[in-house]
Amino acid sequence: MNLFNVYPLYEMTPSHANMCYVFDKKGEKYLDLYGGHAVISIGHNHPNYIKSLTNQLNKIGFYSNYIINDLQKEVANEIIQQSNCHNYKLFMTNSGAESNENALQVASFYNKREKIIAFKNSFHGRSNAALSITDNYKIKSEINKKINVIHIEFNDKANFDKEISKGDVSSVIFESIQGVGGLDQPSTDFIKHISKKCKEYDTCLIADEVQSGFGRTGDFFAFQNHDINPDIICMAKGMGNGFPVGGILIKDHIKPSFGMLGTTFGGNHLACSAVLSVLKTIKEESLLSNAKEMEIYFREKISKIKSVIKIKGRGLMLGIEFDFETAQLRKNLIFNHKIFTGGSANKNLLRILPPLNINKSHIDMLFNALKEELK
Ligand SMILES: Cc1ncc(COP(=O)(O)O)c(C=O)c1O
């Protein structure tokens, strides 16, 4: 049987991987500066990750959420401690879309409203509500068009105020740095403004940290750069370093009730052990400060490349904007230089989302490859 053909594939089949390198069947070594869409946070096959999953697998890999799972409590405590986001409770999911879907659901249960404000150029995932709030009509089916959502430009206070002041908005969901959209960021002034307005109208503010969270930007969560406290925080991707896991942090004023949310796989033992190994490694290897240091070096170095207009993003969630479309350059980087990078809705942008423990030599490799390609 053939596969349902929805992915345009590069001709490359990985056979194994180690930290920031992926190897193909022929033994070729590729530098992974993309981490499979920002997923590989502590490095492929990090020893802590292997050890944690192996130990757990030898005890119990899975049981559902109708028994006590102390590992979920450990995950919750460690996230709260490392992120400094106190007064939140954790609910675990399996993916980014599911985290967002549940966040919207919790908000709607809380204030009994249905309307959602999202932002232009946003991407929030592929489940129904997550697609509804995503600003890309090409990937929406008819069922995704039934949800009551309005998309507003970042920093457009006038339109935002006009909508929220109607008093019928359940939630406002935003990415502090747009990933798929192309690394654009709202201003701190705007984020503080929407946070204040959400409080005023009892609307839930949801931070989609699926891509930008878990240390990627050099802060535990990217919204922390703006000094706000969202009502709900959505996580996935780097949280499990490749193990499919997500979660939402829900502020204490939003009360749970039995049956309000549920999942069979979410927060299973193996998933928790993956998250705990990521959290342990973030702490042991000071990955937040490494992300900040590497950003400085990256900007210094890569801005010297010909045709670079701008370097966007923060920490190790970066975009290099060129004065031409980058599809061919991405291919050349893979096939001529054995370096993975990513694309985005902005066709002139290369997305860089490496493991958080890369060092300067990896950035030098990208620099040399770009210099050669663009001489
Ligand atoms: C900001 C953001 N939210 C949600 C998602 C969806 O996550 P997943 O693919 O794990 O469902 C993504 C995926 O790229 C994302 O970047």
Image (cartoon, rainbow, N blue to C red):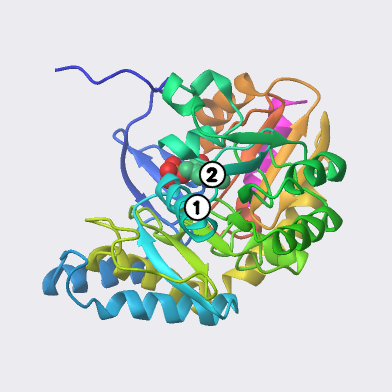
Quadrant in which the C terminus appears: top right
Label 1 SS: helix
In this view of the protein, can residue 178 be seen by the observer? yes
Specify the amino acid type for callout 1.
Answer: Ser
Label 1 environment density (alpha carbons within 10 Å; few <14, some 14–19, many ≥20): some
Quadrant in which the N terminus appears: top left
Instruction: Please tell me whether the stretch drawn in magenta is mainly helix, strand or loop.
Output: helix
Specify the amino acid type for callout 2.
Answer: Glu
Residue 256: x and y, percent? 40, 69
Question: Does 340 lie within the magenta span?
Answer: no
Residue 304: x and y, percent? 84, 41
Label 2 environment density (alpha carbons within 10 Å; few <14, some 14–19, many ≥20): some
Left or right: residue 254 versus residue 152 is left
Label 2 SS: loop
Q: In whole angstroms, how far apart are the C-alphas of marks 1 and 2?
A: 6 Å
Mark 1, residue position: 108
Q: Residue at x 51, y 72 (%)?
A: 282
Q: Residue at x 20, y 72 (%)?
A: 56
- In this rendering, is residue 305 above or below 251? above
Numbered disc total: 2
Mark 2, residue position: 114
Q: Nearer the viewer, residue 158 or 307?
A: 158
Sequence-wise, which precedes: disc 1 or disc 2?
A: 1
Which residues lie in the magenta part?
Answer: 363-375
Q: Nearer the viewer, residue 321 or 375?
A: 321
- Look at the numbered discs 1 and 2 and tell me whether their residues touch, using CB distance below 8 Å: yes
- In this rendering, is residue 352 above or below 276? above
Q: Residue at x 80, y 61 (%)?
A: 192
Question: Does 374 lie within the magenta span?
Answer: yes
Residue 15: x and y, percent? 28, 40
